[in-house]
């Protein structure tokens, strides 16, 4: 080997200095690169969380405003308001008839305003009834001004402090007036959450028309410069990022469905070393400088080595070359090991900072590792969980068969995924989308299991609230029809009771005339006249019929009330075997007033169906949505030009292999091909205001596919009709 001291002045000190400089440069580069990757992950996490929060706020506001728009539309169709225009058309005087009509309308407006509350405060700050010319007829709580210029639907008030929800009042096929409701924007802050009061984290509500801030958040009262122009170009929905000298900023904008509003979230994070591309450029420049210095030193070394070449033997040269090759090989191995170590480090960072709970068990199910998200979601710390079995999370809501099916998949080396209901350390329940994957060693044996769990409790709670809101809406829509259905049998029950009262009175007079004859006295001629006047043969024939008809009416009322009770009952939250045909019959009964005027409804139910695993309350809601949609489609067909036969709705149930197939078919107007792919989207509807909120089919698909583990599809031809097809398994899903 040739000594570095012998090669023309190339000393050990020079080599050590070069090595130290190279090591420091590599270390600086590693730190900058690690910070850069961490900053990127932080930005991605903030963007994902902000996008999800903005979508959730927009969905909640859209549902809130959609509910109030439906309330205003129902109020505009109220008979108390229409009666005013009827009385005015009849020529009633303002002092008597019209004044009384307005008093009744005012009571209805006050009742609606007091019923719609948000945190014990009226959600509607002002409710007005106006005529066609814009004059205020009735206002609650006070007139608050003259005519209004608000357009139909939801618009922003001129003072930009409230929203105006306006619906027309129809009289004799034309618009005779309007109902106008005002919702103060500051009330919407309660739906968006409290003010954050932080210049780097704010939730704003802006106008979708001019991008002006309507609802500020703490010190943040305006959008950053340049953001309004960017939002106009994106149609109100955007995800923007920009930087200043110290911070990285994120702007997420999501439009509120059905309203001229948009939710804007502002988030900021500190800029760190390595968070910008120019930091990486500095690293590359440093590396280039070190390499250039090394190249200069190497050239110097080679020149001086040539000057001393005569003193180096061929054997020494060969030894030096061999040593260089060995060093190169060793350098490649060290580089490969460093790269592998960096990859393991990055993987560790990713697992530790993941938002999903991650746990690793051995082949026997003993927990070996949990990440911080596991502790945040379940409440079990790493020290408490490691060494125990995942059964510490068992809620007891899944039966033994569920876990046996899961372990069959895992022990066979196949991954398993599904939704688990687990229990936190404090005893509360959490819903988690869970994925479990087996880990194999070099010989293919399963040695560990990796479990990833995502907390979906809040999402399920929101879906349940939406379903309950629609169910309450449906019950409210059906109430008037049910009252009409009950009124018919009550009328002929009353008629028969009055006939019975008259017949009993006639019989009482006959008994009064016959009683003296039984005592040995009395006037037989008077008794004979009483019998003839009572017409006993007629009473003997008709009284039993009246009693039978009365009992039939009572049974009809009982059937209607029982069906309504079964439909509105919340039911169990766990699936259990149920009579599917009976559930369909109950829904048909409560919805009778929705379809009987436009269609004939035929039931073709398979009497041999076995019990089907159901959530009866949710299934009833799905069937109600489909039947009401079918009736509306038939009614819409009747508005088209030409002659149309009476509509027909057919509801059938059949057993196909291991499933039950339910069909709801109608001969209505059908679904246009252009909108068929969107009918299951939330808040999408083709109906006019007041007839639908666009949630029925979206919630129907969520119930059938997410809760009942079935499928829902449809077949439709425009102008010919639509058939919805529901397929449910006869055995409960694991």
Image (cartoon, rainbow, N blue to C red):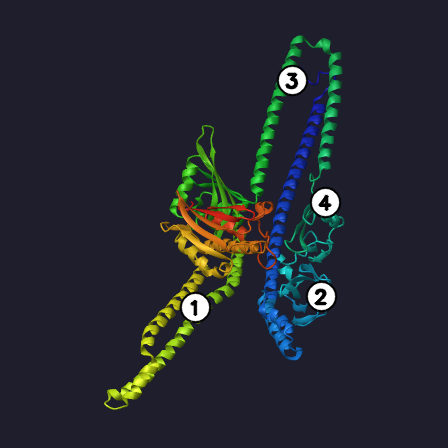
Please give the name of the residue rendered at 71% of the width and 26% of the height, measured from the top-left corner.
18
Counting residues from the N terminus, which is met first, the one under dot 4 or under dot 1?
A: 4
The reply to whether dot 3 and dot 2 touch (C-beta < 8 Å) is: no
Location of mark 3 (residue) = 324
Q: Secondary structure at mark 1?
A: helix
* Percent x, y of residue 332: 61, 23
The reply to whether dot 4 and dot 2 touch (C-beta < 8 Å) is: no
User: In the image, which is nearer the foreground, mark 1 or mark 2?
Assistant: 1
Q: Nearer the viewer, residue 530 or 239?
A: 530
User: In the image, which is nearer the foreground, mark 4 or mark 2?
Assistant: 2
Q: Residues within 10 Å of mark 3 (few under 14, many from 20)?
A: few
**Label ID, residue 489:** 1
**Label ID, residue 148:** 2
The reply to whether dot 4 and dot 1 touch (C-beta < 8 Å) is: no
Q: Residue 57: name its quadrant.
A: bottom right
User: In the image, which is nearer the foreground, mark 3 or mark 4?
Assistant: 4
Q: Nearer the viewer, residue 197 or 181?
A: 181
Q: Secondary structure at mark 2?
A: loop
Counting residues from the N terminus, which is met first, the one under dot 1 or under dot 3?
A: 3
Location of mark 4 (residue) = 242
Residue 509 falls left or right of residue 567: left
**Quadrant holding the N terminus:** top right
């Amino acid at each position: 080997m040739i000594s570095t001291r012998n090669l023309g002045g190339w000393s050990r000190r020079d080599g050590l200095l070069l090595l130290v400089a190279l090591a420091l440069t590599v270390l600086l580069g590693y730190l900058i690169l690690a910070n850069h990757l961490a900053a990127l992950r932080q930005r991605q996490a903030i963007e994902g969380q902000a996008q999800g929060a903005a979508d959730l706020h927009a969905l909640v506001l859209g549902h809130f405003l959609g509910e109030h728009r439906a309330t205003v539309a129902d109020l505009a169709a109220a008979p108390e308001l229409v009666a005013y225009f009827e009385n005015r058309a009849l020529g009633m005087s303002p002092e008597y008839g019209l004044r009384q009509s307005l008093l009744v309308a005012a009571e209805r407006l006050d009742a609606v305003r007091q019923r719609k509350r948000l945190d014990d405060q009226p959600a509607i700050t002002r409710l007005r009834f106006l005529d066609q010319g814009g004059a205020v007829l009735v206002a609650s709580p006070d007139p608050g001004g003259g005519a209004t210029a608000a357009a139909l639907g939801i618009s922003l008030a001129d003072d930009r402090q409230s929203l105006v929800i306006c619906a027309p009042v129809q009289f004799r096929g034309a618009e005779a007036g309007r109902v106008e409701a005002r919702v103060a924007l500051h009330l919407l802050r309660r739906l968006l959450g409290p003010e954050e009061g932080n210049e780097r984290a704010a939730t704003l509500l802006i106008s979708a028309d001019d991008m002006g801030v309507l609802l500020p958040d703490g010190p943040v009262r305006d959008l950053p410069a340049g953001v309004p122009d960017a939002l106009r170009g994106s149609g109100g929905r955007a995800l923007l990022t920009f930087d200043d000298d110290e911070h990285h900023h994120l702007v997420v904008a999501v439009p509120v469905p059905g309203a001229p509003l948009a939710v804007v979230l502002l988030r900021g994070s500190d800029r760190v070393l390595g968070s910008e591309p120019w930091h990486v450029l500095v690293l590359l420049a440093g590396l280039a400088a070190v390499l250039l210095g090394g190249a200069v030193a190497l050239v110097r070394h080679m020149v001086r080595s040539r000057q001393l070449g005569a003193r180096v033997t061929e054997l020494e040269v060969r030894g030096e070359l061999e040593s260089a090759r060995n060093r190169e090989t060793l350098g490649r191995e060290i580089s490969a090991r460093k790269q592998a170590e960096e990859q393991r480090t990055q993987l560790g960072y990713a697992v530790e900072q993941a938002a999903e709970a991650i746990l690793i068990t051995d082949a026997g199910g003993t927990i070996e590792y949990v990440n911080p998200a596991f502790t945040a979601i379940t409440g079990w710390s790493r020290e408490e969980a490691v060494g125990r079995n995942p059964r510490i999370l068992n809620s007891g809501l899944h039966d033994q068969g569920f876990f046996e099916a899961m372990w069959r998949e895992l022990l066979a080396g196949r991954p398993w995924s599904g939704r688990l209901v687990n229990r936190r350390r404090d005893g509360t329940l959490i819903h988690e989308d869970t994925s479990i994957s087996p880990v194999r060693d070099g010989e293919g044996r399963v040695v560990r299991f990796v479990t990833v769990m995502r907390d979906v409790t809040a999402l399920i709670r929101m879906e349940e609230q939406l379903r309950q809101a629609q169910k309450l809406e449906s019950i409210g829509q059906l109430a008037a029809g049910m009252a009409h259905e009950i009124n018919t049998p009550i009328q002929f029950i009353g008629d028969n009771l009055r006939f019975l009262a008259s017949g009993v009175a006639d019989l009482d007079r006959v008994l009064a005339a016959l009683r003296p004859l039984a005592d040995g006295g009395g006037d037989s001629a008077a008794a004979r006249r009483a019998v003839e006047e009572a017409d006993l043969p007629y009473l003997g024939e008709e009284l039993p019929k009246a009693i039978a008809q009365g009992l039939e009416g009572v049974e009809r009322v009982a059937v209607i009330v029982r069906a309504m009770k079964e439909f509105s009952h919340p039911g169990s939250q766990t699936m259990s075997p149920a009579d599917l045909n009976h559930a369909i019959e109950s829904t048909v009964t409560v919805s009778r007033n929705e379809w009987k005027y436009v269609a004939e409804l035929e039931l073709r139910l398979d009497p041999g169906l076995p019990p089907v695993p159901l959530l009866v309350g949710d299934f009833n809601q799905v069937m109600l949505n489909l039947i009401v949609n079918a009736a509306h489609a038939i009614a819409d067909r009747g508005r088209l030009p030409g002659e149309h036969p009476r509509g027909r709705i057919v509801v059938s149930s059949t057993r196909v292999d291991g499933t039950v197939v339910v069909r709801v078919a109608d001969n209505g107007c059908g679904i246009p091909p252009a909108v068929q792919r969107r009918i299951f989207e939330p808040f999408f509807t083709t109906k006019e205001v007041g007839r639908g909120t666009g949630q029925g089919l979206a919630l129907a698909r969520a119930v059938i596919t997410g809760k009942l583990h079935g499928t829902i599809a449809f077949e439709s031809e425009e102008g010919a009709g639509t058939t919805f097809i529901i397929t449910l398994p006869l055995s409960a899903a694991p």
